[in-house]
Amino acid sequence: MGNPSDFNDLEAIAGPLAVRAAVDKALADATTPGTDSARQRDDSPLTPPQMRPEGFPPLLKEICEAACENSEAHPVAVAFNVLLFFCAMVGRTAFQRIGDAVIHCRLYGIIAGKSGKARKGTSETLVRLLFSIVDTKLDERIKSGARLRIHAGGLSTGEGIAYAIRDAKEADDAGKGGDTGVADKRLLVLEAEFATTLACSRREGSTLSPTVRNLWDGRDIEPLTKTATTRASHPHVVIGGHITGQELREKATDGDTANGLLNRFMVLFVYRPKLVPLPKPTRAASIEWLAQRLTCAVMAATGGNLHGNCEREVRLGDEAAELWCELYPHLTRDREGKIGSLLARTEVYARMLAMIFALLDSRDEIEPCDLLAAMAWIDYWAESAAYVFRTGDGEDDQVSEFEAEVLELIRTQPGITLTAIQRHWHNNKVKPVKAALERLTSMAPPLIVARKEAASPGNGRAPVRYWAG
């Protein structure tokens, strides 16, 4: 077991000292100068983000493997959809205290990738099926009659969201205006055209942006105008969107990042990692087994009360608390520009993700492995934001003559470094080489694969090596 993602397994196999060594190594990788994935060196081209193995805890890893085995889905997109559905399913029952504040499993995120080529929709198919089965199994166990509501019709107004989870309202003196309301405040919104949502939020008089921000914070929706009287208390709305990199760059204004709308959304860049001309369905036995385990995780997280509010507290274990204090300075450092604004809520998201990973494992205590998994997702988010906003996402599929030369060089010299590639042209084509490498790594599927080595002791430079895809 060379690189176990579960620290409980590692302790059972190699003892507590091995766990401490693994934690120290991950911390060193995260804090060593020059290894910060969000701050790419000017002399090195940006490469598509890569999720570290610890970002896929056991259950999440098994679901991703099942979904990606015979499809073109990207594992990060599959995993993120699992997290979205799981968060929406468990509602507000589980919570975590951060000082005087309380957070729930309420994930917002945008999957960014090429339209039609990133297989964003494909990554959702098996996940929808799994949680539909989970819904049925939960109803058989607790007889609540509650089914997770999934809205895929688009986000256009704040009033529309409020109405979907509205409170009951008594009739007036004339017997008019009464409404039984909606008892289940859980709502999963899947917006396939998130660019439209951004456009709607900027319409004059639109309440969409402030409503979405308040929902992420878990605040009640309480309109103050006479004409808008729909109230929604204890909301639990989870939002996932799809967008192309080009749309995100064009439509994400400085206002969207500065006012706190977009920095409530994780941005995750994905692409088609392989070609599967004849995809096969996932085995029925695998689907049943995974759905059963997800059902157990939801039951453990909620105690069977899908409509609860702050009834099960999730806490940091002693070792996790110690690790969090070590990771916090790196996580909370200032970042400049638009990318810095987009990553303004990484601290909260790290704690939220760690809680989600603990609950997926049917625990109410966060362990070091949960924090390290969360940090892998935070780093992937940072890399995605840098990649989308600084390089684009390879919308043009045509390979230029020079890019073909770079590709042929990598094919003949697998594992070649950036320095060696530039020397091939006697350092006379530094910028064209960088541009070619960025384009070739962003194709769908990528024509080349880049892997960054660990930085050598005393040297912050981590060499990047390239292989043909």
Image (cartoon, helix red, strand yellow):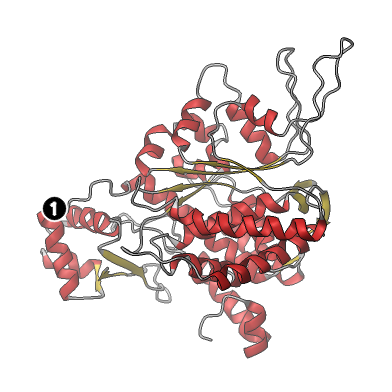
Q: Residue furthest right?
A: 173
Looking at the image, residue 423 lies above or below residue 343: below
- Who's the residue at 27% across and 69% down the image? 466
Quarter location, residue 328: bottom right
Q: Is residue 209 left or right of residue 252?
A: right
Element type at mark 1: loop
User: How far from the left and from the top, in percent, is residue 17?
Assistant: 65, 86
For disc 1, the marked residue is 400
Q: Position of residue 74 (x, y in %)?
A: 43, 60
Considering depth in this image, is 442 or 275 the residue closer to the camera?
275
Report how many numbered discs are placed on residues in the image.
1
Locate the C terminus and report the quarter of the image it occupies. Answer: bottom left
Between 234 and 452, the residue placed more toward the observer is 234
From this viewpoint, which residue is outermost toward the top? 174
User: Amino acid type of disc 1?
Assistant: Ser
Closer to us: 17 or 191: 191
Q: Residues within 10 Å of mark 1 (few under 14, many from 20)?
A: few
Is 149 or 227 nearer to us in this picture?
A: 149
Q: Quadrant of residue 316?
A: bottom right
For this view, does 437 lie left or right of residue 67?
left
* Residue 203 visible at all: yes
Residue at the (56%, 54%) spot, across then down = 128
Q: Is residue 71 left or right of residue 232?
A: left
Give x and y (percent) for residue 103: 73, 48
Residue at 28% from the left image edge and 46% from the top image edge:
395
Q: Position of residue 202 (x, y in %)?
A: 50, 24
Work out whether residue 315 can be spotted: no
Residue under the point 45% across and 37% down: 193
